[in-house]
Image (cartoon, rainbow, N blue to C red):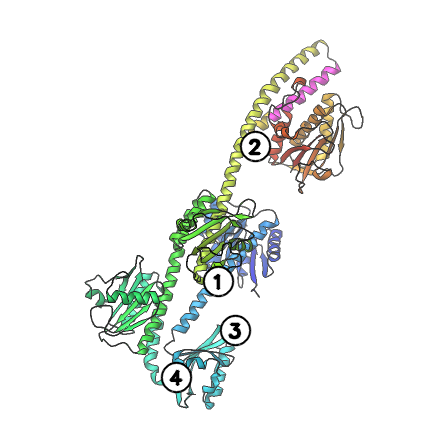
């Protein structure tokens, strides 16, 4: 059963905070959310929290200040900034402050699902890193005492015994496993040992030290001292201990104490040079070898000296030897055999220098080797060799840590390039270069999901991959190893990918493969041509890298959307300028002529009919001024109110009737308007909405015939045309039973100047105004066929 993920949600809006917590719990059965509305209250609830989700814009203390306070208390606690007030500046400051993830709020459940995935990934990554540190601690704890007899006892039986324990107990090492430990304890000391074990298991003490008597397998009694504590073994508590015969205690106690101090110093060292220097000092001062050196792999077949003792430095005139793989000298072959085989060698008179010295060459994992030699040509005794092995294991662990930290620092530096890449493709290229140069993956690639959501085409692939594969494949989301990782949002590591159930090509040249999802963007893939497992630390580092790539891809997508919007706004402004020209020239000038002649006529005979004409001219002049102002400003609608579309439609119809001299409500010989009861309300500028409806209704009357029937209703108010999507949209529609518009001409009707009634004075202005007003509100407008065969204009809000 997966452990519970406890999430603290902090948002000054109580309803949004509760909604966020509820959505997180719904998207994860193992998620438990606690909610606070201030940063101060949130800070008091941090105990036992696995992740913090915080708003940015909060009174008194904003999200970044809250992040800083959390980081002072817990530098590694996952912290997600989830805010509606986002900007590149806030994102940059958040990343600099150490935020784990940054996500903009949005409408719809998919945004909260994305937040839940981000939270889960952050917590799993943090737990993996924490477990890695615990594992290293347990490993060091075991290795640091390997010169003793090491054992692990669970439920009274020996689960692990090292050679030292076998020697002390006088029995075969393999045979000890499964035996009851109590059979070797003297009867008089059995109650003492059981009481000490109880205290350790029940947590009264972490570590304990005491002396008792054992009876060896051959019957000889030996006094031993035990050091032990409780550990996790196979998911269950167990007792791990170290036995030493009391007669050897003093010498080994001094050695182990000194090595413990050296181990702490190794763990504090900030670079591999510092680690190597501490190791050389330990060889000289603790193990009492006269000559020591740490030689690390510098690539190109060279194990170069990073730290050596003064004796070695003087012997080589300040320039200690680099051991080369292609050198035939026996000393070089000896060192390289140890490095390649990862097996320690003890030597007598064939040491890796010209002087006849006995010593040890110990491997340091994939980092290099540790050399320890004395003046005598004889091989070191077994106890001394065990001490060298102990030191080498600690040095290797310290080098693992510094290498991990160096890679993290390099990843952070590379993140700057990722975050400045202008497009998703550029981000992918930068990611491939970083994976090669920083993580060491010569074969790697980034595959981004396409618009269909069914394929993962390559966005960038390393040169080595292209050389081996000839062409990078497009991967299936439903039927590929990478697709499975993408769908599940889970890392997949394969020691041999040919054995994976969903592998597309069982003969692929790629054998070792790591697939890390990039959120909803795609996947990062790294591999090699030889089978082999991935270390936990390696996977952890790849997750950190993938999180940075995902953030960069999200930023690039957002910026691309902004650029697209800016381009669209420029086009809109150009259309508005064109619109302004039409309004100013084609409408205002003829209107002024008409107004002038009307005034002259009224001077001769001021009839009611001429007065009505003057009022119509005044309304038209006002409308022209309003439209011209809208076109000149080119600004979207800012102030809106809830407006009843049906009421505005009736008002617009009355105005059309006043102007046209016809348009009834029920007369079969005149145009008629029907407003459906379900006609919705919308948030709009009332005057602009009326203008839009007047133009749509005028268009229906103008083109629909003498007795056209016009209907205003909701989008779902009648069966829509065959070319419609049928999706659940909101808005309203204006439909008529006139002749309609051919499908191939429907988009063109919204263009300025497009008209089919020029002989009757049409100027192609009305429907262009409709689209302009809709765009100003952020709506979509389209023309489709109505159920009765006429035209149907749909406004999607």
Discs 4, 1 touching: Cβ within 8 Å: no
Instruction: Return the x and y of residue 422 as percentages of the image width and height.
Output: 45, 42
Disc 4: which residue: 168
Task: Give the mark nearer the N terminus: 3 vs 1.
Answer: 1
Measured Cα–Cα span from mark 2 to mark 1: 51 Å
Query: Residue 451: which quarter of the image?
Result: top right
> What residue sits 61% from the left and 26% below the top?
627
Q: Is residue 218 magenta?
A: no
* Neighbours of disc 2 within 10 Å: few (<14), some (14-19), many (20+): some
Identify the element where label 4 is drawn. helix
Which residue in the structure is indicated by mark 3? 236
Task: Please identify the quarter of the rendering in which residue 378 is found.
Answer: bottom left
- Magenta range is 607-627
Mark 2 or mark 1, which is nearer to you?
A: 1
Q: How far is the residue under mark 3 from the one under mark 4?
A: 27 Å
Q: Is residue 278 visible?
A: no
Please tell me whether mark 2 sits on a helix, a strand or a loop. Answer: loop
Upstream in sequence: badge 2 or badge 3: 3
**Local crowd at mark 1 within 10 Å, few (<14), some, or many (≥20)?**
some
In the rendered structure, find residue 128 and report the number of the disc placed on it.
1
Between discs 2 and 1, the one toward the N terminus: 1
Which x, y percent locates residue 304? 28, 61
Majority SS type along the magenta span: helix
Horizontal side of 318 relative to 747 (left or right) equals left
**Cα gap from disc 4 to disc 1, whole angstroms:** 38 Å
């Amino acid at each position: 059963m997966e452990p519970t993920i406890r999430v603290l949600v902090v948002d000054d809006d109580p309803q949004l905070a509760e909604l966020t917590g509820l959505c997180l719990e719904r998207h994860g059965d193992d998620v438990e959310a606690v909610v606070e509305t201030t940063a101060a209250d949130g800070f008091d609830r941090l105990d036992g929290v696995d992740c913090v989700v915080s708003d940015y814009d909060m009174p008194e203390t904003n999200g970044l200040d809250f992040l800083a306070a959390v980081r002072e208390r817990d530098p590694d606690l996952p912290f997600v900034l989830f805010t509606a007030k986002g900007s590149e500046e806030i994102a940059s400051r958040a990343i600099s402050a150490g935020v784990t993830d940054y996500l903009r709020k949005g409408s719809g459940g998919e945004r909260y699902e994305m937040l839940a995935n981000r939270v889960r990934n952050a917590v799993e990554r943090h737990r993996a890193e924490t477990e890695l540190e615990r594992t290293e601690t347990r490993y060091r704890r075991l290795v640091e005492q390997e010169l003793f007899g090491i054992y692990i006892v669970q439920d009274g039986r020996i689960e692990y015994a090292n050679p030292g324990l076998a020697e002390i107990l006088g029995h075969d090492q393999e045979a000890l496993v499964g035996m009851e430990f109590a059979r070797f304890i003297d009867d008089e000391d059995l109650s003492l040992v059981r009481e000490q074990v109880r205290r350790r298991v029940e947590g009264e003490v972490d570590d304990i030290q005491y002396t008792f008597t054992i009876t060896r397998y051959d019957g000889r009694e030996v006094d031993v001292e035990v050091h032990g504590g409780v550990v996790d073994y196979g998911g269950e508590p167990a007792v791990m201990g170290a036995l030493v015969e009391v007669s050897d205690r003093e010498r080994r106690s001094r050695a182990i104490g000194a090595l413990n101090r050296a181990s702490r110093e190794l763990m504090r060292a900030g670079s591999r040079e510092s680690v190597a220097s501490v190791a050389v000092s330990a060889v000289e001062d603790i193990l009492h070898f006269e000559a020591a050196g740490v030689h690390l792999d510098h690539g190109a077949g060279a194990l170069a000296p990073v730290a050596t003792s003064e004796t070695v430095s003087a012997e080589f005139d300040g320039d200690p030897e680099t051991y080369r793989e292609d050198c035939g000298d026996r000393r070089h072959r000896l060192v390289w055999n140890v490095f390649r085989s990862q097996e320690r060698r003890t030597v007598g008179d064939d040491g890796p220098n010209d002087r006849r010295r006995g010593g040890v060459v110990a491997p340091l994992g994939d980092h290099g080797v540790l050399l320890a030699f004395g003046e005598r040509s004889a091989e070191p005794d077994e106890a001394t060799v065990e001490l060298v092995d102990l030191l080498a294991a600690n040095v290797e662990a310290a080098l693992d840590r510094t290498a991990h930290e160096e890679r993290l620092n390099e990843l952070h530096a590379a993140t700057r390039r990722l975050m400045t890449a202008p497009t998703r493709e550029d981000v992918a290229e930068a990611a491939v270069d970083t994976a090669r140069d920083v993580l060491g993956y010569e074969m790697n690639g980034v595959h981004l999901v396409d618009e269909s959501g069914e394929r993962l085409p390559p966005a960038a692939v390393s040169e080595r991959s292209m050389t081996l594969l000839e062409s990078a494949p497009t991967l299936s989301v439903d039927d590929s190893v990478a697709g499975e990782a993408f769908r599940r949002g889970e890392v997949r590591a394969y020691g041999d990918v040919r054995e994976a159930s969903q592998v597309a090509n069982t003969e692929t040249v790629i054998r070792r493969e790591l697939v890390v999802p990039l959120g909803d963007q795609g996947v990062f893939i790294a591999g090699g041509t030889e089978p082999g497992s991935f270390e936990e630390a390696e996977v952890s580092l790849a997750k950190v890298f993938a999180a940075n790539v995902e953030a960069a891809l999200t930023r690039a997508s957002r910026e691309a959307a902004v650029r697209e919007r800016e381009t669209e706004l420029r086009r809109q402004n150009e259309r508005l300028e064109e619109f302004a020209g039409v309004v100013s020239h084609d409408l205002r000038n003829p209107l002024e002529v008409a107004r002038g002649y009307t005034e002259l006529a009224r001077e001769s005979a001021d009839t009611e009919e001429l007065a009505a004409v003057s009022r119509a001219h005044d309304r038209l002049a006002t409308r022209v001024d309003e439209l011209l102002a809208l076109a000149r400003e080119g600004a979207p609608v800012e102030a809106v109110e809830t407006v009843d579309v049906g009421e505005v439609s009736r008002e617009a119809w009355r105005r059309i009737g006043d102007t046209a001299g016809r348009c009834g409500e029920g007369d079969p010989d005149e145009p008629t308007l029907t407003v459906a009861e379900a006609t919705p309300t919308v948030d709009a500028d009332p005057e602009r909405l009326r203008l839009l409806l007047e133009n749509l209704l005028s268009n229906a009357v103008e083109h629909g015939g003498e007795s056209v029937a016009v209907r205003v209703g909701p989008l779902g108010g009648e069966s829509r045309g065959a070319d419609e999507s049928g999706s659940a949209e909101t808005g309203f529609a204006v439909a008529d039973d006139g002749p309609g518009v051919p499908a191939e001409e429907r988009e063109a009707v919204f263009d300025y100047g497009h008209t089919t009634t020029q002989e009757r004075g049409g100027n192609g202005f009305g429907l262009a105004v409709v689209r302009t007003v809709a765009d100003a509100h952020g709506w979509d407008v389209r023309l489709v066929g109505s159920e009765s065969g006429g035209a149907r204009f749909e406004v999607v809000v």
